[in-house]
Amino acid sequence: MNNSIDQFAKTVALLQSNLKGDYEIRPDNVFLEGEPKNREIIGSFVEQVWKPGSAIRGVENLKKLHEYSENGKACLLLIEHYSNFDYPALFRMIEKTEGLGPEVAESLLPIQGMKLSASSALTAAFSNSYDTIAIYPSRSIDSEKDPEKQAEIRRVSMPINHAAMRELTHRKYHGNMVVVFPAGTRYRPWDPDSKKGVREIYTYLKAFDYVSFVSINGNLLVPCQEDNMEKDTLNPDVLLFTVSEPVRGKDFRQEKTDETPEGQDPKQYVVDQVMAELDKYHEEAEEYRKTLI
C-alpha cells in the first residue's frame, strides 16, 4: 500500500503540472474544459486500484441512453456518490468496456460543485482534468446560517448558477449526457444527511427527456472522517456500476408526485424516491458483488 500512496502522490503532482487552463469559476466561465493527458493518467491509475471483477452492469442501458443523446434527446445520469474516484472510475470503465468506449465516455458532462475546485489543489487536480459544468451547490448556500453572509453568497452564486443552467441547456441537446450526483455530496456513514437527495433534482427530472439511475458498489477512495479530502484513503476494491434502463424524466416525476402521501412535500418526496431507486439497484448489485469478493 505504501507504494500505492507514493505513486498517488507522484500522480497528483504530474496532474497539477499539466493543468494550464482557466479554472476560476465565474459566470463567463462555468464550462471548464478538462485536460485529456490527465484523463489518461488518472484512468491508468484507477485501473490499478480496482480489483478483478470490477465492471459496468447494464451496458445495453447506457448504450441506449447514449443513442437517445446522439439523436438530440436530453439525457441524464443520476448517480450514487461515495468517493472522489467515482467519476474517474466510471469514465475509465466506460472507455474500456466493449460496446461503449471512448466516444461514450467523452460524451459525459458532470455537474461539479465549486467546492471540488476550491477546497484543495489535490481535488482540483482530478476534477479539473474532466470537462465539467460548475455550479454553486445549494448545500453550500443553505449551510450558512448568518443572514448577511448568506445574502452575500446568494449574490455571488446566482449569476454563476444562471449561467450554468444556460450552458447545460445548450449542451444537453448537443450530444452530452449530463451526470448529476443527486445527494450533492459523497455519502459518509457518520453523516446520514449526506445521503439525502437535494431538491433541485425535482427540476432536473422535468428538464431531461430520459434518465438512467446508476448505483455504485465498492469504494476506491474512502472519505476521511475529519472531512479533509486530502486525507481520503486509497482502497483497492471490486467496483460495480449498475445502469438502469432509461425512463422518461417527466413520467417518473409525475408518477412519484401523484403517489405523494398526504401532508408531505411533493418535491422532496420525488427526490426521496430517486434515492430509493438508487438504493434498490445498490442492494441488488451488492448481493452479486459479494460473490466476487
Image (tube, rainbow, N blue to C red):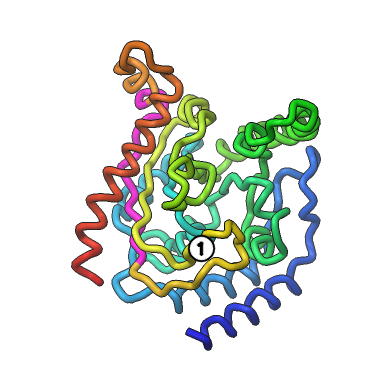
Residue 102 visible in the shown view: no
Frontmost residue, 255 versus 168: 255
Relative vertical location of residue 23 with respect to residue 255 in this rendering, above or below? below
On the image, numbered disc 1 is attached to which residue?
A: 85
Q: Which residue is found at the position 25% from the left and 63% from the top?
A: 289
Relative vertical location of residue 149 with respect to residue 96 in this rendering, above or below? above
Residue 50 in the figure: left or right of residue 35: left
Boundaries of the magenta span: 239-252
Residue 83 visible in the shown view: yes
Q: Which residue is found at the position 20% from the left and 57% from the top?
A: 287
Whether residue 243 is in magenta: the answer is: yes
Relative vertical location of residue 185 with respect to residue 237 in this rendering, above or below? above
Q: Quadrant of residue 217?
A: bottom left
Q: Residues within 10 Å of mark 1 (few under 14, many from 20)?
A: some
Tell me the quarter of the image containing the C terminus.
bottom left
Q: Amino acid at mark 1?
A: Phe
Residue found farthest to the top: 262
Residue 61 in the figure: left or right of residue 265: left
Residue 129 in the figure: left or right of residue 103: right
Frontmost residue, 187 versus 65: 187
Q: Quadrant of residue 137?
A: top right
Relative vertical location of residue 53 with respect to residue 132 in this rendering, above or below? below
Residue 77: percent from left, percent from top: 45, 43
Residue 83: percent from left, percent from top: 49, 59
Per the image, label 1 sits on a secondary structure element best described as loop
Q: Which residue is found at the position 29% from the left and 17% from the top?
A: 259
Q: Quadrant of residue 48?
A: bottom left
Residue 67: percent from left, percent from top: 41, 45
Residue 100: percent from left, percent from top: 40, 59
Q: Which residue is found at the position 45% from the left and 55% from the top?
A: 82
Whether residue 253 is in magenta: the answer is: no
Residue found farthest to the bottom: 3
